[in-house]
């Protein structure tokens, strides 16, 4: 059952390696007024502080910006899919993955800390990008995401 769920999310969570597009979208986002930016953020106690930003300059792509508890973040560009179709869809997906990760570690999601080399510190699950959560969950189950493609 768990493998099917990992396979399900693996269909929809497709990161895109395109630094130029990420930088362009970030520059557009920061130019918006704080009032306009509010429409792109959700702050969920469990799923984290996340901004989902799509713009006509990057059709079919969506930027995920996950704010850390310190002055840091992780930003990932994805292909638009059902997981990123709405804030609620992303909250549900992130919560599903966090629940599965924590169940495998016999703890609660808020108690799990993973060392993030890029930030040079331990981060909680809600501070991780959605692709990182999927990778962590699959790795904990001994599943290679590449083998599911």
Image: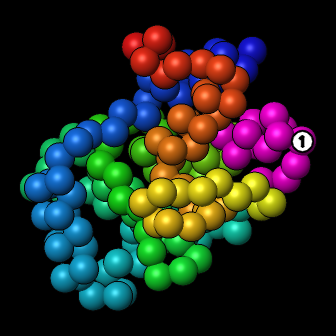
Under tag 1, what secondary structure?
Answer: loop
In percent of the image, x 69 and y 24: which residue is there? 141
- Does the stretch in magenta take in 26? no
Which is more toward the observer, 120 or 27?
120
The reply to whether residue 9 is visible in this rendering is: yes
In percent of the image, x 23 and y 42: which residue is there? 17
Per the picture, the main secondary structure of the magenta-coloured stretch is: helix
Q: Is residue 107 left or right of residue 99?
A: right
Residue 140: give x, y in percent of width and height. Answer: 69, 30
Q: Is residue 12 left or right of residue 45?
A: left
Quadrant of the rendering where the C terminus is positioned: top left
Q: Is residue 128 left or right of residue 58?
A: right
Q: Residue 103 appears in which quarter of the rendering?
A: top right
| Magenta-colored span | 97-109
Q: Which residue is mark 1?
A: 106
Residue 6: give x, y in percent of width and height. Answer: 60, 24
Quadrant of the rendering where the N terminus is positioned: top right
Q: Look at the picture and state if 46 lies above or below 4.
A: below
């Amino acid at each position: 059952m768990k493998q099917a769920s990992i396979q399900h999310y693996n269909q929809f969570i497709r990161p895109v390696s395109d630094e130029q597009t990420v930088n362009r979208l970030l520059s557009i986002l920061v130019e918006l007024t704080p009032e306009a930016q509010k429409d792109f953020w959700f702050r969920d106690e469990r799923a984290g502080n996340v901004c989902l930003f799509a713009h006509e300059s990057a059709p079919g792509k969506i930027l995920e910006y996950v704010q850390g508890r310190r002055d840091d973040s992780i930003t990932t560009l994805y292909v638009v899919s059902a997981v990123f179709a709405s804030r609620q869809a992303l909250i549900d997906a992130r919560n599903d993955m966090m629940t599965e990760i924590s169940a495998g570690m016999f703890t609660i999601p808020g108690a799990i800390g993973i060392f993030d080399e890029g930030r040079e510190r331990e981060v909680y699950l809600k501070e991780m990008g959605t692709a990182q959560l999927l990778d962590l969950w699959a790795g904990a189950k001994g599943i290679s995401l590449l083998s599911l493609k």
